[in-house]
Image (tube, rainbow, N blue to C red):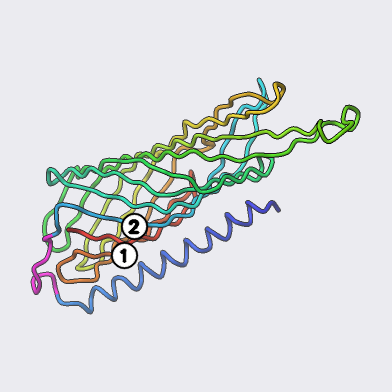
């Protein structure tokens, strides 16, 4: 079994019980708190700041030669800060920035260090049922970009290799660009706010090799699967609802687990 397959299984095992625990503990926690009418309630500020860490893995493909397709599992760890604003009630706009790395062992042990990552997105409430146990249908669009770099020493074939000068260092740069569109249903029970939905994701990335002429080329890096599921929950910790814990998992197109803190001002 490949190492990446083992990592996927470990991540899946982490996602399942953690979400199960949250979906069990959160309702119990919410039931023990005063009802929403007993506190000021939904008076969140204009700005929202999120700090999150995410572990994600997905299968990617690229055409290394005409008609020759390579496939591998791309793993990425992200630490992001998101700043959001709501100019109108149903609309939320946000920017995000932080650090991300990229590891694709199937592509000649590619291991890119952490680099600056940035992006943004928009969230729109399509339908809202008001009240303490409100229900919302929301669509979210998101993008994340970063550049990952690694280098490798390529040894020439034994038949042509006569000295150390025949060794070649090839630098590899991956420009990672991912886009996501989600449609989710979110419901509310006092301080517990779970959500569940579907997602469409797209990769428009490039993999560039820079070295000797025979190695220099640019390849398109794309996703293996587009459609997936997303599930998560917000758990509020204060009566004014200005501080929450967020846990989110994605499945099928991308296997990921994200844990973050949300603060409203």
Q: Callout 2: 10 Å neighbours few (<14), some, many (20+)?
A: some
Q: Please give the count of numbered marks on the rendered protein.
A: 2
Is residue 40 part of the magenta span, yes or no? yes
Q: Earlier in the sequence, mark 1 or mark 2?
A: 2
Identify the residue shown where x is 49% and y is 51%. 56
Identify the residue position indicated by label 2 in the image.
Answer: 51
Q: Give the left or right position of residue 139, taking residue 109 as reference.
A: left
Quadrant location of residue 130? bottom left
Q: 221 or 9: which is nearer to us?
A: 221
Q: Give the left or right position of residue 232, taking residue 228 as reference.
A: left
Is residue 198 part of the magenta span, yes or no? no
Q: Callout 1: 10 Å neighbours few (<14), some, many (20+)?
A: some
Identify the residue shown where x is 62% and y is 27%. 63
- Region of the chain picked out in magenta, as a range: 35-43
- Between marks 1 and 2, how big is the CA–CA gap? 10 Å
Image location of residue 258, percent across then percent down: 41, 57
On screen, residue 218 above or below 54: above
Nearer the camera: disc 1 or disc 2: 2
Image location of residue 29, percent across then percent down: 28, 75
Residue 245: mark in rendering: 1
On screen, residue 146 above or below 114: above
């Amino acid at each position: 079994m490949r190492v990446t397959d083992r990592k996927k299984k470990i991540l899946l095992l982490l996602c399942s019980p953690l979400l199960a625990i949250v979906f069990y503990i959160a309702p119990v926690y919410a039931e023990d708190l005063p009802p929403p009418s007993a506190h000021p309630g939904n008076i969140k500020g204009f700005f929202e700041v999120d700090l999150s860490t995410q572990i994600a893995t997905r299968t990617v493909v690229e055409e290394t030669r005409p008609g020759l397709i390579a496939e591998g599992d791309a793993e990425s760890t992200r630490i992001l800060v998101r700043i959001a604003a709501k100019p109108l009630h149903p609309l939320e706009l946000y920017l995000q920035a932080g650090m991300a790395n990229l590891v694709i062992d199937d592509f000649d042990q590619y291991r890119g260090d952490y680099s600056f990552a940035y992006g943004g997105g928009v969230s729109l409430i399509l339908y809202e049922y008001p009240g303490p146990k409100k229900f919302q249908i929301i669509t979210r669009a998101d993008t994340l970009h970063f550049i990952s770099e690694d280098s490798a020493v390529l040894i020439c074939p034994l038949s042509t290799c006569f000295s150390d000068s025949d060794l070649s260092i090839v630098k590899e740069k991956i420009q990672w660009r991912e886009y996501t569109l989600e449609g989710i249903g979110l419901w509310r029970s006092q301080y517990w706010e779970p959500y569940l939905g579907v997602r469409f994701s797209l990769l428009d990335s490039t993999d560039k090799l820079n070295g000797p002429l025979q190695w220099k080329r640019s390849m398109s890096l794309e996703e293996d699967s587009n459609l997936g599921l997303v599930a998560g929950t917000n758990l509020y910790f204060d009566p004014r609802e200005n501080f929450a814990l967020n846990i989110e998992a994605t499945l099928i197109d991308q296997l990921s687990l994200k844990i973050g803190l949300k603060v409203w001002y």
